[in-house]
Amino acid sequence: MPSLLEEVTTHDTRFPRGLWVGLGATLLLSVALFGYRPLVFYFNHVVTDNAHIQGALVATSPSVSGRLAEILVEEGDSVSSGQLIARFNDDTFVAELQRAEAVRDQAASLLAEAQINLELEAEKAGPLAKRDQADLIAAQARFTSARASVEKADADFKRVQRLAESGLVSSAELGASSTLSQTRRANLEAALEAVHHAEATRKLTNGHQGELRIRRQQVLTARAELKLAEAGLDLAGIRLTQSRLVSPVRGLVARVASRPGERLDAGQTVCLIRDLDELHVVANVSETEIRRIREGQSVSISVDAYPDATFDGKVLRVGSVTGSNFALIPQESVGGNFVKVIQHVPVRISVADPEGLLKVGLSVVVSIDIREREPAVVR
């Protein structure tokens, strides 16, 4: 009786060879159809699951010193840019603002007073100066006319005196000519005195012009004082605004570092916020594949937390050192033994997240399309 092995052998020998060929062809065709796309994808992409979502950590701190009155957020809360997250006791800041307003109002009043004094002095000094100048000009003109009359009277007196010596005119005509000459000289002296008086009056008016210049300078000083007071008011308003701490970014509160009632100095951290608008992926790419990575290449990002969603990104920057160089404990062995370990280079990748689903720290799988830019040739 034949054994079971002999029966199987006999049965296999009798199995049709054409059927074996068909099965092999079917297998090869299946591999070609279903394995082509993964094979092409493998050659055109660099894939790694050593990647995480990271984001900027923003320290939120006040610009003024004060006592913290209230914190309006807790760890894990979502905040928007400009949202109020903490408030200081603002009694001091409100008092400073009110004082600055009073100083501004006082400076504005002093400026108005200086302008009124300037206008009054200008009204007083302006017409007086014009009048005194006109009087001086008139007095000088009368003096010139009187001097000409004296010169003519003297000439006439000398001519009449010569005629009187020759007996051609009477002594009465000689006396009248002498009297006229003396009268003209008296008029000349009066005109000269009028000129001196007009000059003195004008000098007195010039003293008013000096007062007018002083008033103008007082207006300039008052205007500068008002600007200084307005700057102080603006500063007090800024300090009051800064007593209310707002979030500078849209993000998540990672840590609350202060508590209500604490006295904080300017620059002291109140809370730490993860900036959601600065989310990016850091993928650690093997040193054997980093030569194929270039900035600007498209990236497909799969997130473990959302398996049905795919996010798009771009390669932003390829790191210049490996991650091991930042380790606290160096990899160099002091014993002389060496074990080669494949190093990884960090690659920073942008990620588009319009719906805000991604969270800092999530694990992701990145597929970098290396067809877009050819790697540089190293010779």
Image (cartoon, rainbow, N blue to C red):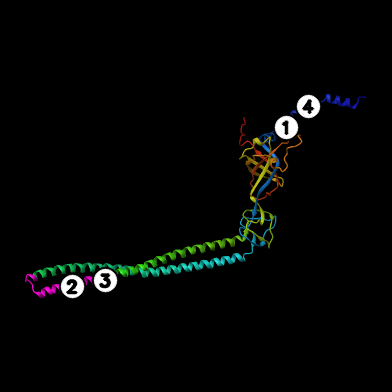
Determine if the magenta segment contains residue 184. Answer: yes
**For the residues carrying marks 3 and 1, which lies nearer the camera in this image?**
3
Mark 1, Cα crowd under 10 Å, few <14 / some 14-19 / many 20+, is few
Q: Which residue is mark 2?
A: 182
Determine if the magenta segment contains residue 243. Answer: no
Please state which amino acid type lies under the numbered disc 3.
Answer: Ala
Q: CA distance from mark 2 to mark 4?
A: 164 Å
Residue for point 35% across, 67% down: 206
Q: Is residue 123 left or right of residue 376?
A: left
Please state which amino acid type lies under the numbered disc 2.
Answer: Gln
**Could you tell me if residue 171 is visible in this image?**
yes
Q: Which residue is mark 3?
A: 194
Mark 3, Cα crowd under 10 Å, few <14 / some 14-19 / many 20+, is some
Q: Nearer the viewer, residue 49 or 345?
A: 345
Q: CA distance from mark 1 to mark 4?
A: 17 Å
* SS type, badge 3: helix
Q: Which residues are magenta?
A: 164-189
Q: CA distance from mark 3 to mark 1?
A: 130 Å
Sequence-first tag of 3 and 4: 4
**For the residues carrying marks 3 and 2, which lies nearer the camera in this image?**
2
Q: Which residue is mark 4?
A: 20
Q: Which residue is mark 1?
A: 31
User: For residue 99, which quarter of the picture?
Assistant: bottom right
Q: Nearer the viewer, residue 244 or 249?
A: 244
Sequence-first tag of 3 and 1: 1
* SS type, badge 4: helix
- Say if 84 sits above or below 311 in the image: below
Q: Position of residue 33 (x, y in %)?
A: 70, 33
